[in-house]
Image (tube, rainbow, N blue to C red):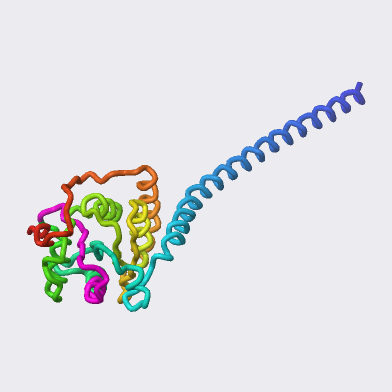
Amino acid sequence: MGRIYLITSDCEIMTARRTRHKKRGCLSRLIRAFVGLILSIVLVVVGIPLTINFFMCASTRPSFTTVSSSSIQETAFDADAIVVLGAGINWDGSPSAVLKDRLDTAIALYNEGVAPKIIMSGDNSDSSYNEVMAMALYVEDQGVPADDVFCDHAGLSTYDSMYRLRHVFDVERCVVVTQEYHLYRALYDAHSFGIDAYGVPSDNATYAQIDEYEKREVLARVKDFVAVLTNSEPETKSEPVSLNQSGTVTQWW
């Protein structure tokens, strides 16, 4: 009987070991499945934005040119307008360093005869904050006739600016002026509305917060990509504005 008892104990031990082994195997498979799920989520969250950014930059880069480029007259000869996208203004109402460089670049293009009009597109959603006024007054002080300066007071975003450029100002061909990090998205938005747009980077200096701007731009490109995909429309509606009139009709402040 003692020997039989020992054999029975050995069987029970082996059975218990098999049970523990199976439990460990199940736990291991669950851990692998969980890790795989996390990696898949990370791949989607990181991979999709990076892919969108790469596509947007690669597809618009051929439309870049410069003020001094010999091709500027060829690429933008028949442009309806030079478009300057708004940026921040200082406490005293003067253009920030980023915006000033955009405006100086636009003035140089205007003086080269690239286009007969300049459109200032920026934020004037609040009576106490008027980007387009600061932009228009700056270029006019530099000698650009007020008749040739048009203001889009509802350019609350890059996407809105390009939408309104096509649907409000009826622009078919233009030169867009902004810093390089921003220019890819601006051109992508413009092209999505059927505008034959070229871009001139206005990086005339090194900006203190450029790293922050570039980081934010990664997500901003994704946002505009989705807006284009869903054919989003801006909330602010406006009557059409003809460029065959004096720009002063759009200058109210």
Q: How many dots with numbers?
A: 0
- Quarter of image, res 186: bottom left
Horizontal side, residue 139 vs residue 42: left or right: left
Which percent across, then down, holds residue 22? 72, 33
Residue lying at the far left of the rendered structure: 253
Horizontal side, residue 21 vs residue 118: left or right: right
Measuring 43% from the left and 57% from the top, which residue is drawn there? Answer: 56
Which percent across, then down, holds residue 28? 66, 40
120 is within the stretch colored magenta: yes
- Quarter of image, res 207: bottom left
Q: Which residues are magenta?
A: 106-127
Q: Nearer the viewer, residue 191 or 223?
A: 191
Q: Nearer the viewer, residue 29 or 96?
A: 96
On the question of residue 47 being in view, the answer is yes
Measuring 12% from the left and 60% from the top, which residue is drawn there? Answer: 245
- Quarter of image, res 189: bottom left
Measuring 12% from the left and 71% from the top, which residue is drawn there? Answer: 145
Above or below, 49 relative to 96: above
Q: Nearer the viewer, residue 119 or 205?
A: 119
Above or below, 119 relative to 34: below
212 is within the stretch colored magenta: no
Which percent across, then down, holds residue 208? 31, 71
The quadrant of the picture occupied by the N terminus is top right
Horizontal side, residue 35 vs residue 111: left or right: right
The quadrant of the picture occupied by the C terminus is bottom left
